[in-house]
Structures are given as structure tokens and as C-alpha cells.
Image (cartoon, rainbow, N blue to C red):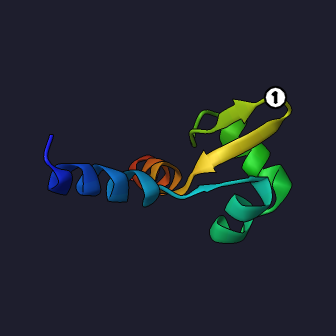
């Protein structure tokens, strides 16, 4: 792999934005109750790391856009 390709992969990898529950609530402007309902109904993807949940902002926004149609 060339150095240019390595740089592109590295830039793409770091462009992902992973946030915690508070962060996604601020982005979506929703309450913890609403967020819980979205997760329970499978409307948004999340990762569980121990007792904490993390959200890939790009995937969450894409999922909500698809579900809105």
C-alpha cells in the first residue's frame, strides 16, 4: 500500500464521530426517554461497551433518515 493510500485510510478512520449518550441527546435534541425508545424499537444503532452506550453519529443520522421515509 502506498503512503497516500495509508493517509486516506487514516483520515477516513478518524473522521468517524463516536459519542456517548449525552452527546447523541444533544445532537438529536431529545430526552433520555426518547433516546431509550429509539434504541428499544431498533430505530438507531448503538454499541454497548460494558455499561455504557456509544453512538456513531453518521450511522444514527442515516438510520433516522431511512426510518423517517
- Position of the N terminus, as image quadrant, is top left
* Residue at 74% from the left image edge and 51% from the top image edge: 35
Q: Is residue 30 left or right of residue 14?
A: right
* Residue at 19% from the left image edge and 52% from the top image edge: 3
Question: Quick one: 10 or 42, which is closer to the camera?
Answer: 10
Q: Which percent across, then down, holds residue 53?
A: 75, 40
Query: Which residue is tagged 1?
Result: 50
Q: Which percent across, then down, holds residue 67?
A: 45, 47
- Badge 1: few (under 14), some or many (20 or more) residues near its Cα, within 10 Å? few
- Report which quarter residue 30 is drawn in: bottom right
Q: Which percent across, then down, holds residue 11?
A: 35, 59
Q: Residue furthest front?
A: 3
Q: What element carries label 1?
A: loop
* Residue at 49% from the left image edge and 52% from the top image edge: 64
Question: Quick one: 68 or 49, which is closer to the camera?
Answer: 49
Q: In this view, does 45 lie to the left or right of 33?
A: left
Amino acid at each position: 500500500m502506498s503512503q497516500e493510500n495509508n493517509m486516506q485510510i487514516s483520515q477516513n478512520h478518524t473522521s468517524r464521530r463516536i459519542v456517548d449518550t449525552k452527546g447523541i441527546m444533544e445532537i438529536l435534541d431529545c430526552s433520555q426517554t426518547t433516546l431509550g425508545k429509539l434504541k428499544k424499537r431498533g430505530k438507531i444503532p448503538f454499541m454497548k461497551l460494558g455499561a455504557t452506550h456509544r453512538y456513531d453519529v453518521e450511522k444514527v443520522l442515516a438510520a433516522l433518515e431511512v426510518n423517517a421515509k
